[in-house]
Structures are given as structure tokens and as C-alpha cells.
Amino acid sequence: MKSKNTDAFTRLTDALKVLPNVGPKSAQRMAYDLLQHHRTGAEELVSALQQALLQVHHCRLCNTFCEGEMCALCADQTRDSKRLMIVHMPVDVASMEAAHCHDGLYFVLMGQVSPAQGMDLSHIALDKLVARLQNHAVEEIIIATNFTAEGDATAYVLAQLLKDFPGKVTRLARGMPLGGELEYVDAGTLAQAVYERRKITDN
Ligand SMILES: [Zn+2]
């Protein structure tokens, strides 16, 4: 937190530590570098960050990041609204779209459940998902979480949550590499995993 006694350089390095995998040493290096070599770039960074904070919000329907109330995918009337694919992050939507294997809609959890951190559910958007399903008719839910310990835990939590869902609940086939994160899987493998998805509830 900013304190009146903190000098500008310390405040900057402290602020940079908010970035993933950036500890005190890297924060200090970044700060030196920005101030020494990239002052114009640093100004652009400040301005872009301010604009993004003001304009980028979560889509009302799918929870991904977008500007405005609804993202372009949710607004697209040609998509099959009866099939909803649940993914961890916006980057997974991009991977699926690049693989051209899903013409339905998405729901983005914005995180995953971690068994190592006590299966805490507070940081994934389960309430919003439930509301989404109550307000819009869906016939199939495709769970497209990663094939990692976290992805499996998230899929388990979703399967429990959806056990009374009247439609079909499926999960991507295990054609994916073990420990595979969707983000790093090639489009062909990803498409195959979607086509060979399997039912995980009895409905
Ligand atoms: Zn959306």
C-alpha cells in the first residue's frame, strides 16, 4: 500500500510486484529499465492500463473480458446457444475458436480450483454460471477444463454442481496430453478432444 513516506522508486517496484512471477529483484530490474530506457513506453503503459481498467469488464453472459455489456461471441446470433462450453480462461476461448470445433457459446470461470489450496471455490464464477443456466435454455454443457490436477478438480466440482442438470454434461476426451493445458495444445488435438467428448452425468 502507498504510504506518504514511500519514495517514488519504491512505490513503483512495489506496484510491479503485482505482476505474475515478479519478485522484488525482477520488479527492481523492470523499474530501472522503464525509467532508463523506455520512458515513452512507460507513459503508454500507464495510459493503456488506465483505459483498460475503465473500459474492460466481464461479459454479462459468459463472464469473459469485454468492453461493453456483452462480448461479440455472446451477441452472435449464428452461434448454437443450446451448447455451452465451460473453460478456465479467455485464452481457452481463443484456442477453441482457432480450432473451429465448437459453434456453441462459452462460459469462462476466470480461474480454476486448486486441490493444493484447499479446493477454494471463491475465485471461480460458479454463482454466475448457475444464474446463466437458470436464465437461458441449454441442452449440453461441455466441460473443457485442463487435464491437470487443477483442471480435474474443477471438472469434479462442476460435475457435482451440475448433477441435476436435465441436459447432457460432457467432458473433453482424454486425447489431450496428460498435464495438458488447453492453451498449449495444438488445434487438431483440441478439435479431436471436443469431437470425442464423453458424458459424465447420467442425464
Ligand atoms: Zn460473452
Image (spheres, rainbow, N blue to C red):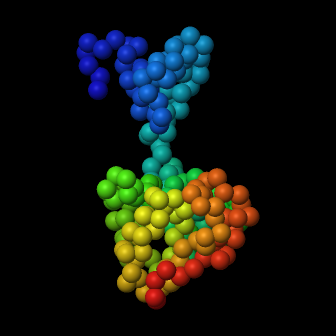
x and y, in percent, of residue 9 in the image: 41, 13
Q: Residue furthest bottom?
A: 203
Q: Residue furthest right?
A: 188
Q: Is residue 26 above or below residue 123?
A: above
Seen from the viewer's position, the closer of residues 63 and 126 is 126
Q: Which percent across, then down, holds residue 116?
A: 37, 53
Which quarter of the figure has residue 85?
A: bottom right
Q: Judge from the rendering whether residue 154 lies leftward or rightward of residue 175; answer left or right.
A: left
Q: Position of residue 135 (x, y in %)?
A: 40, 75
Residue at x 51%, y 52% (from the top left corner): 66
Q: Report the residue that reaches farthest toward the left.
A: 4
Tell which of 159 and 12 is nearer to you. 159
Tell me: residue 128, above or below residue 80: above
Residue 60 placement: quadrant: bottom left
Question: How many marks overall?
Answer: 0
Q: Position of residue 86 (x, y in %)?
A: 50, 67
Q: Quadrant of the N terminus?
A: top left
Res. 193 in view:
yes
For image coordinates 40% across by 77% down, the residue present is 162
Rendered position, 175 above or below 163: above
Q: Which residue is painted at 59% across and 22% down in the image?
A: 41
Residue drawn at 53 percent across, 78 percent down = 170
Is residue 59 something one can see in this rendering?
no
Q: In terms of depth relative to the viewer, which is nearer, 145 or 66?
A: 145
Q: Nearer the viewer, residue 153 or 36?
A: 153
